[in-house]
Amino acid sequence: MIGMIWAVLFDWLDGIVARKMANRSATDSSFGAQLDILIDIVSYGIAPSILLLSYGNFKPIFLIGAFIILSASALRLSYFSTFGLADGKRYVGLALDNNNIILVFIFLFEAFFSGVTFSIILYTSILLLSILNVSRIETPKLSGNPINVYLLSTYTFAMTSIYGWKLLNQ
């Protein structure tokens, strides 16, 4: 959970840093965009897939959910890299970084449910997020806005503290 939320913060910050770099060429920008897509598929597609698989003890039914989130992530990234933002301000479909923000929050409640019940909650959440990722709904671009970056930073430090405390008290 700690790694998943820090991936979002670093993803939001790397774009800000890149845009402030002096003498950044079009080639640098293109390379950075391609590298960002690779990192996004790992952070927002592969990581949630592994999370779901490991939580479900790699049972075959969890392979289906892992495949769905990974496929939805690849489709979402392909669509965005082809079409970009709607009106320069909104995404078509839920941006993938929101998946990690939501999943990290959901995992706070794991201790309140049995393993079976929480696996159903996790599985259902991942399926719903996958549907939203490839849907036609328009969602605002949250990254890049300084206020949202501060809010995400606060959330990241809070989640790191909570999960760090949980790790130390196991």
Image (tube, rainbow, N blue to C red):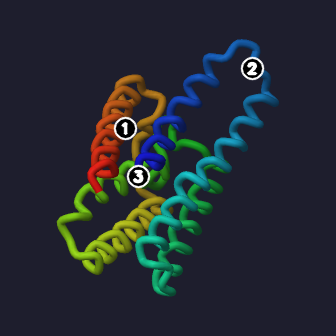
The residues tagged by marks 1 and 2 sit, at their Cα atoms, a distance apart of: 29 Å
The residues tagged by marks 3 and 2 sit, at their Cα atoms, a distance apart of: 33 Å
SS assignment at label 3: loop
First-in-chain label (1 vs 2)? 2
Residue 35 location (% of width, % of height) = 70, 42
- The reply to whether the C-beta atoms of the residues labelled 1 and 3 are less than 8 Å apart is no
Residue furthest top as drawn:
22
**Callout 1: 10 Å neighbours few (<14), some, many (20+)?**
many
Q: Which residue is mark 3?
A: 1
**Residue type marked 3:** Met
Q: Which residue is mark 1?
A: 156
The residues tagged by marks 1 and 3 sit, at their Cα atoms, a distance apart of: 10 Å
Residue furthest right as drawn:
27
Q: State the residue at coordinates (35%, 53%).
A: 104
**Residue type marked 2:** Arg
In the visual, does 67 lie left or right of 34? left
Foreground of the two, 160 or 63: 160
Residue 167 location (% of width, % of height) = 34, 51
Q: Is residue 117 above or below residue 160?
A: below
Q: Is residue 83 above or below residue 58?
A: above
- The reply to whether the C-beta atoms of the residues labelled 3 and 2 are less than 8 Å apart is no
Q: State the residue at coordinates (44%, 39%).
A: 141
Residue furthest left as drawn:
112
**Residue type marked 1:** Thr
- Which quadrant holds residue 45? bottom right
Residue 169 location (% of width, % of height) = 27, 51
- The reply to whether the C-beta atoms of the residues labelled 1 and 2 are less than 8 Å apart is no
Q: Which mark is residue 24?
A: 2
